[in-house]
Amino acid sequence: MSIVVRTLSDQTYEIVRRRILTGAMSPGTAVRQDSIAGELGVSKIPLREALSRLEQDGLLQSYPNRGYVVRPASTDEAAEVFALRLKLEPAAAADAAVKASPEDHALAETALSALEEEMGKPEGDHITRNRAFHMALVRPGGHVTGQLVERLQILSERYVRIHLEPFGRNERASREHREILDAWKAGDAATVEALLVEHIQGTLADLEQQLST
Amino acid sequence: MSIVVRTLSDQTYEIVRRRILTGAMSPGTAVRQDSIAGELGVSKIPLREALSRLEQDGLLQSYPNRGYVVRPASTDEAAEVFALRLKLEPAAAADAAVKASPEDHALAETALSALEEEMGKPEGDHITRNRAFHMALVRPGGHVTGQLVERLQILSERYVRIHLEPFGRNERASREHREILDAWKAGDAATVEALLVEHIQGTLADLEQQLST
DNA sequence: CGCGAGAATATGGTATACGCAACTAGCGGG
DNA sequence: CCCGCTAGTTGCGTATACCATATTCTCGCG
């Protein structure tokens, strides 16, 4: 199915990204290239490629001759990211719902199954699966749109992971996922868009509630 | 002013990007890492970092163990990119108009002057200046928004450069730039948004006319 | 107590080597 | 005659070693 062979750069990218998203590398910390490379057992080329990609993702910032620093997270940025998601993602998914092929339907169904399975486990990484599901809804609509939405999801993941994961996702989100996928597979663009707006706003509301405490 | 010290990776990135945008490296051509590195007089690390960034920009595509290929341009993609620009850029500029500081005003004014100056020269690179001006209007609004819009501009630049540059930009675009900047500096968000929609649609219309011939 | 010169550190970059995947070409068999 | 296998070749991905330079730290001196 998906690409099995991934380069070391790809794997390094994902490992470091996870560290940032989970807060294992907290905002403001400088990235020590030698130590991370040694720790992961890779050399500078794949490591630097990974860092370069993370900078474009907005998770790192580079200062010439001083290296990379983990970009701070802020409530302002969270608001910006969610506003952009609301502007792009529902419409993109609605558009994709019309264009999706049977294989796309199968992929989305698989993604949701994987997510639901992971929701059961207490230590499961359901946030990654959640992103995969959301992306499956958007991808058939267009390559560029998909890339932009994915980037926003990566950024929003920081906030969701930090503030919402500890409490476990509520049942509402699961129910909504099912409804969204059903409308999506039926090609019902308007319903997909409406449900997704609601769904993202729901996540945002949960987030704001946590942030305000 | 802008950062003076730029890494070799940055410079390599810009050189290769320009080659792709101008069509010097046409879609479908494989990127021969050794030859390009030799030609530019850089080693693999900066070259590969540049290619990695260009892949995220959507200008290259990598196939593991087979290297990078210049991504094809298509009318479909052009339509997608312009639809996204219309969805994001006018609102972003309108938002930025409200937030912009006096320094931001000065930067935008400078960017427009630079653009107009370049418009006079027949061989001038006014497309790069055009992007800089558009970005100056958006940047004060938010970091993430700015990055997304910039990415869309880079992609749209391919089509503008190939299909519109040979004919020189018309007078209308110049007049519109002035009007947009005036409204922007006045903080008149609604007008900025309306004018920018019109402006982008105008470019798109020119493009479609060229593509249909 | 402040400051400046040198030491220590880390980044950015080069050169080189090597394994391995993927393309190519030629050879042999059905 | 064509197909499939095999050997050679190309070029990517990665590692290692090394250097130059910019930054940071330290420590002694005024």
Image (tube, coloured by chain):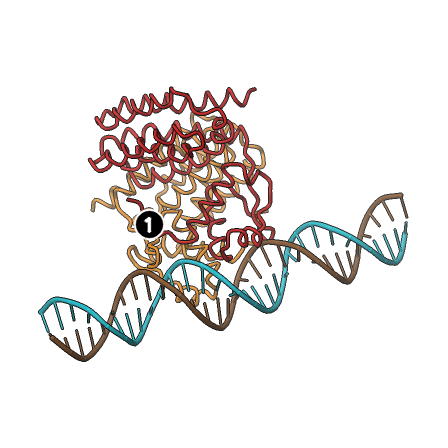
Chain colours: A orange, B red, C cyan, D brown
Q: Which chain is indicated by disc 1?
A: B
- Estimate how packed mark 1 is, as few (under 14), some (14 to 19) or many (20 or more) residues with alpha carbons within 10 Å: few
Displayed quadrant of residue A20 = bottom left
x then y, percent, for residue C22 = 66, 52
Q: Nearer the viewer, residue A41 or A115?
A: A41
Say how many tags the image has.
1
* Image-based side of A108 in relation to A19, left or right: right
* Image-based side of B184 in relation to B122, left or right: left
x then y, percent, for residue B176 = 34, 22
Circle 1: element type:
loop
x then y, percent, for residue B141 = 28, 36
Displayed quadrant of residue A81 = top left
Q: Quadrant of the C terminus of chain B?
A: top right
Q: Is residue A56 above or below residue B193?
A: below
Q: Nearer the viewer, residue B20 or B91?
A: B20
Q: Residue at x 45, y 50 (%)?
A: A118
* Image-based side of A172 in relation to D4, left or right: left
Residue B8: tell me if it is visible.
yes
Residue A194: tell me if it is visible.
no
* Image-based side of D16 in relation to B28, left or right: left
x then y, percent, for residue B122 = 44, 29
Q: Is residue A155 above or below residue A182?
A: below
Q: Residue at x 38, y 41 (%)?
A: A152
Q: Quadrant of the N terminus of chain B?
A: top left
Q: Residue at x 31, y 51 (%)?
A: A71
Q: Which residue matches tag 1? A: B4
Name the amino acid type tagged 1: Val
